[in-house]
């Protein structure tokens, strides 16, 4: 039993916790960047009241970060820092519940866009609004990775 566990541990892509914080930052940057890119492209297609839309989306995104994503990214950062292994699996930046939540959110976003239930000009605002807190959370992961100390 001990030998098989050792064999499995050698197969897993283990990385230092500091690097795992950067991996988490990259994943959140990718998600936030993709939403911001898609949202801004769609906003460009519907330029009426552009500054008002941007102002409202950015404001709502900052509020979303402050009231929701700040706690989520803090929880993930603390969990990564407290992982029992020195070299946790590179996919452990999320716990299973968070992977499920991410899958549901991506599916809902794709489903909403493909269904046509909501006009693209409104989806653009949603994309920008959600891209902001994801990107700010990514910065939190990068900063925690940058200032990470082993004995935290």
Image (cartoon, rainbow, N blue to C red):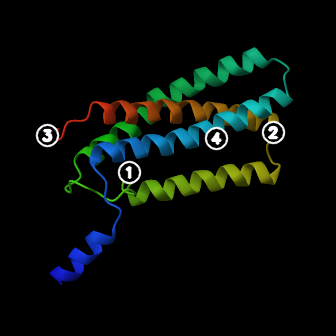
Q: Quadrant of residue 149?
A: top left
Q: Which label sits on residue 93?
A: 1
Near-viewer residue (133 or 68)? 133
Mark 4 vs 3: CB contact within 8 A: no
In the rendering, at what x and y percent does residue 30 appear?
Answer: 56, 42
Q: Residues within 10 Å of mark 1 (few under 14, many from 20)?
A: many
- What residue sits right under mark 2 in the picture? 120
* CA gap, disc 4 and disc 2: 16 Å
Tell me the element at label 3: loop
* CA gap, disc 4 and disc 3: 35 Å
Q: Nearer the viewer, mark 2 or mark 1?
A: 1
Q: Residue at x 85, y 30 (%)?
A: 45
- What residue sits right under mark 4 in the picture? 34
Q: Is residue 127 left or right of residue 117?
A: left
In the rendering, at what x and y percent does residue 50 appear?
Answer: 78, 19
Kindly tell me whether residue 61 is visible in this rendering.
yes
Of pointers 4 and 3, the one earlier in the residue sequence:
4
Whether residue 34 is situated above or below residue 108 in the rendered picture: above
Of pointers 2 and 3, the one earlier in the residue sequence:
2
């Amino acid at each position: 039993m001990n030998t098989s566990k050792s064999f499995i541990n050698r197969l897993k892509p283990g990385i230092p916790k500091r690097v795992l914080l950067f991996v988490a930052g990259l994943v959140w940057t990718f998600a936030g960047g993709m939403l911001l890119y898609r949202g801004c492209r769609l906003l460009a297609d519907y330029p009426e009241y552009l500054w008002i839309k941007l102002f409202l989306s950015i404001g709502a995104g900052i509020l979303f970060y402050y009231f929701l994503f700040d706690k989520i990214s803090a929880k993930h950062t603390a969990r990564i820092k407290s992982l029992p292994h020195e070299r946790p699996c590179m996919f452990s930046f999320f716990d299973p519940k968070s992977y499920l939540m991410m899958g549901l959110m991506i599916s809902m976003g794709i489903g909403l866009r493909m269904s046509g239930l909501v006009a693209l000009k409104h989806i653009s605002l949603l994309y920008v609004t959600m891209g902001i807190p994801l990107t700010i959370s990514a910065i939190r992961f990068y900063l925690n990775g940058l200032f990470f100390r082993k004995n935290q």
